[in-house]
Image (tube, rainbow, N blue to C red):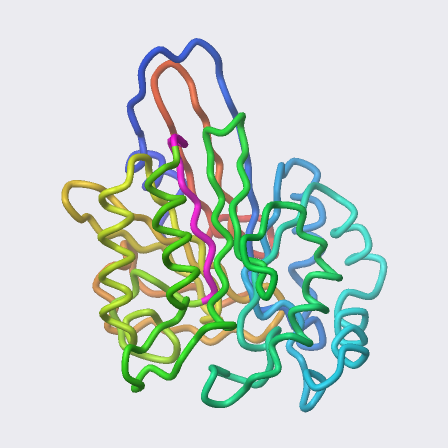
Amino acid sequence: MIDRNLIYASLFAIGTSCVTYETNVTIGFSSCNDPSQTQDLLPTLNKALDTLDLYIWLGDNVYLEDDQWETYSATMTRYNEVFTGDVFHEILGKSTHLAIWDDHDAGPNDCDLSTFNGHAITMEAFKDFWQPTYAQPDSTSYYGRTTLAEGKIDIYLLDNRSFRTHKDSADATVFGTKQLNWFYKTLHKSTSEVHLICMGGQLLNTAQVFENMSNYPVEREMLLQWLSEAPGAPIVLTGDRHSGEINLLEINGKAIVEACASPITANAHPHHDEANTTRVHEGTTDTQHFGTLRLNHSEEGWRIVVSLIDASGEAL
């Protein structure tokens, strides 16, 4: 077993200058929420939220059932079914919550524009439930940016479903031209020192399986180049996989980090033998968990610690 707290504290010390005060921010994150399968992790998450400044839901938050995506009322019924009960009432009542979606929030499994075009209905329900307050440049989507720590930390909330085409189509895309143009301009104009990029599927994982960005190699390479060129430290938060892991890739001398946290309540499916060359530890997680990201900014620079936490409250 690897003590990831120690490993990632040493990897992500980012030097800055002229710092005369300290900032401490702790962010939680998770994906794949189907409480009909297990709720063992929820009491631990509920307790952790007492000390978290922000919690990010990284998609597959509700698992819409067959045809529920066809009407607004059925979609909202599913949200209310999933997030019912005292423990979820307490969880959503603590800290600040942000959310992105993935296929099971948008429509059918693995949906893209070749198989599903009902995003307007499910997007309306998504926004009505999560109530995003940050600026959203496209009214048909939720994508946008918010900041923490007086602008030192940017959080990008990307939409990987509304504009997604099939991986084998001409000019295959996950995020679409308009969203990509917005992301590039916003990222490169930013003066923040840390960039948190939230997306449903994995970015760094090199295995061309399931819905990893490796299935969209042109767009993946473009995103990686942007992250390596932009000022600030990039950390990608992902979900989707029903197993968690920490990935690291260095490009042009810059470390790009990905923390994948999945699942929170859905069944776990480990991928220990997957051909992912960026994972920095042996095997994936094999149980329910959520992630935490502790960011400390002092006169010595940034110290960033990533952990994946199981139902016992221990780092995996």
Q: Which residue is drawn at 46% across and 46% down?
A: 307
Does 271 sit above or below residue 313? Answer: below
Q: How many marks?
A: 0
Q: Viewed as shown, does residue 257 lie left or right of 198? A: left
Q: Residue at x 76, y 76 (%)?
A: 78
Q: Residue 183 placed where, x, y %?
A: 40, 52
Does 12 sit above or below residue 271? Answer: above
Q: Nearer the viewer, residue 299 or 231?
A: 231
Q: Does the magenta stretch include residue 192?
A: yes
Q: Which residue is drawn at 45% across and 68% down?
A: 243
Quadrant of residue 233 within the rendered picture: top left
Q: Which of 162 and 228 is in front in this view?
A: 162
Q: Which residue is drawn at 49% across and 36% down?
A: 294
Range of residues picked out in magenta:
191-200
Q: Residue 213 placed where, x, y %?
A: 33, 69
Does 92 sit above or below residue 302? Answer: below
Q: Viewed as shown, does residue 100 lie left or right of 273? A: right
Q: Nearer the viewer, residue 194 or 27?
A: 194
Q: Residue 168 placed where, x, y %?
A: 29, 86
Farthest right residue? 86
Quadrant of residue 73 within the rendered picture: bottom right
Location of the N terminus (image quadrant):
bottom left
Q: Viewed as shown, does residue 49 lie left or right of 232? A: right
Q: Is residue 176 magenta?
A: no
Q: Residue 227 placed where, x, y %?
A: 29, 48
Quadrant of residue 38 within the rendered picture: bottom right
